[in-house]
Amino acid sequence: MFKTLILVFILGFSGFLHQASAQPVRVLISISKDRISERFSNKVYHKLIRNGFSEEDFSITQDADQHTLYQSLNDPQTQALIWISHGATPRLSRKMKRQIANGAGNGMSAQPELVDYRGDNVAPVFKKYSKNIRYVAVVGCNSQEILDYVGSGIATDDAIEKYIPTKKIIAQFAIRKVIKQLSNIELLDSTTAEPMEPIQNTISITRTIPSDADSDLIRPLRIMIGNELMGVLPALQAGETRTWQIPVSEDKIKQVKLETGQNIMTDPTKINFGDLKITLPDQTSMKIFSKTDGTPFGLNFRLFILP
Amino acid sequence: MKNIKKIVVMAAVIMSIMSTGFAKESHALIGLAFKSKPVKVIGGVGAGLGVGLGVYGYATAVTTASLGGVIVGAVFMYYGVIVAGVGLVILDEKNISDIEFKAIDVNRPEYYTGFSREQVETYNNELAQLNSIRQTMIAESNDTADTSDAEALWKIYSSYLSPATVKIAEQNAANFLTMIR
C-alpha cells in the first residue's frame, strides 16, 4: 500500500545533517518571483567573488524553505548566513502602538512574518542556531521586529555581527552592504561541532505521506515544545514514511506542536500534514487535539497533547 | 558617481510617491479581513458596545455584536521591500496576518483584572488549543458579513476549553476590539 521506508534519524543538536556542506558562508534566497531570485543569486555570487571570496567559501541556495534554513543555521560548519526574503509586518497606527506599549490589547497580537518563496513563515526557525555563527544577515523588511516577536536571540547576540533591518529596505542596497560587512568578518579555517550532551530522553515522531498525495503540498514541519524550537523535519515524498528520534531535555512533556508556517488564509485543501504519530520517552502515544469526530483542530499546525 | 546620484534621486521620487499613495491607508492601519475580503467585521461584548471598527478604508459596517467575529479576525499587513523589475521599484504587497492569542504575564496582575492567577495559568496552558480552535473557526466560517456563523462555531468549540480560558479569551478579544476602534 505505501512504499514504506522507515528510517531512524537521531537528531542531535549538531552534526546530524546527512548533507552537511563545508562552506562557511551560506546564502539562502527565498523569493517567490523566479526572475528576481535568479537576479539576486547572480548579484550575490559576483559580489562575493569581487570581494575576495572563492567558490569554495560559499554556497547559494534559491527557494530555501524552513528546513534548509534550519540545517544551515545549525550546521557547525556555518560561520555566516545570509537570508533574503520578504518580511511582512502589520501596519499599526501611532495610537495603537502607544496603547500596546502601555499594555493595552495584552493577550492578542498580530503576528509578523518572515516569509519564504511559498509564503510560509520561517521566523521561528531563527530561535536556534550554531554557536559557530559569527555573522548573520536577514535581508527582509523590518526583520528586527519579526525576530523580536518570535523571541529569537540571534538579533541580540553580541557574539554575532549582524545586519537585521528595523525598517523597510531596498534589497539591492542591502545586499551590497551585507557583502561589505561580511568581507570584514574573519572566518576561521575550520570549526568544530559543539560537544553533544548525553541524550537523556527522546520523543519519536513518525510521519507517513499517502502514496496519492500531491508532493508539492507537503511541507517541512518545525517541532515546538512550548516556545522552544526542537528541530525541523524535512518534507517527504508521496508514499514515504520516516521516524525521527528527537532529543528532549524534559521528561514531562504535555504538548508538542508541529507547524508548517503556512499563512492563515491558505486553503485547507492545500495543507497536508500526512499521518503523524508522536511517542513520549515513557512510550505514551500522544493524541492530536481534535473534535469528537477526530478532525484535528488548527490550520497550519497540529497540536499533540497527552491522552 | 552621476549614475549613482540619478539612482538615488529616482529612488527618492519613487519612495515619496509610494509614501503619498499609502498615506491615506496609513490611517486604516488595521483592516479586519476575512478570506481576502474586507468583510466579517466584528462587534463587541453584547450589543451595547455598538457598531463600527473605526477602520478607515475598509468596507462593511458592523451590524452585529459578535465575539466570534473578533476571534476569527485577521489583519492586513504589508510585505516589505524586495526590489523587482528594472531599477529601484519598491513592491509593497498586502497579505493577511494572523491575530493570535498570546500568553499573559502572571506577574502583571494589572493585565488580568477580574481573573485569578490560577485562571490565567489555565489560560496560558491552553493557549495552543485556543489558537488551534481559532484557526479552525477561520477556515470554517463563511464569506458573508454576518458573523452568526462565527458565533455558532465559538459556542461549539469553546466547549473544548476550560471555562477560565473561554472567559479570558472573550475578554481579550473584547479589549482588542476596543483598542482598534
Image (cartoon, coloured by chain):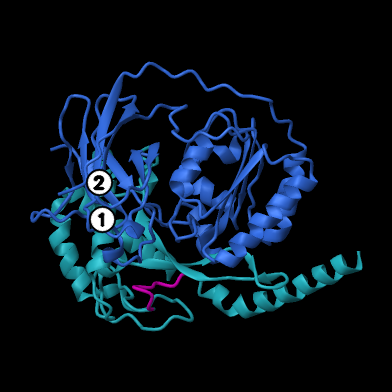
Chain colours: A blue, B cyan
In percent of width and height, residue B82 lies at 62, 64
As drawn, which residue projects farthest toward the top? A198
Between A258 and B145, the one nearer to me in the picture: A258
Identified at 34% across, 24% down, the residue is A249
Identified at 63% across, 48% down, the residue is A164
- Using the image, determine if residue B71 lies above or below residue B16: above
- Label 2, on which residue? A303
Residue B144's label in the rendered image is: none
> Which secondary structure lies at badge 1?
loop
- Using the image, determine if residue A117 lies above or below residue A70: below
- Circles 1 and 2, Cβ within 8 Å, touching? The answer is yes
Horizontal side, residue B105 vs residue A91: left or right = left
Q: Which residues are magenta?
A: B30-37
- Label 1, on which residue? A298
What amino acid type is highlighted by mark number 2?
Leu
Say whether residue B81 is visible: no
> How many marks overall?
2
Chain at tag 1 = A
- Secondary structure mainly formed by the magenta segment: loop
Which callout, 1 or 2, points at the residue further toward the start of the chain?
Answer: 1
Identified at 71% across, 48% down, the residue is A178
- Using the image, determine if residue B33 lies above or below residue A160: below
In the rendered image, residue B33 lying in the magenta stretch gets the answer yes
What amino acid type is highlighted by mark number 1?
Gly
Chain at tag 2 = A
In the rendered image, residue B88 lying in the magenta stretch gets the answer no
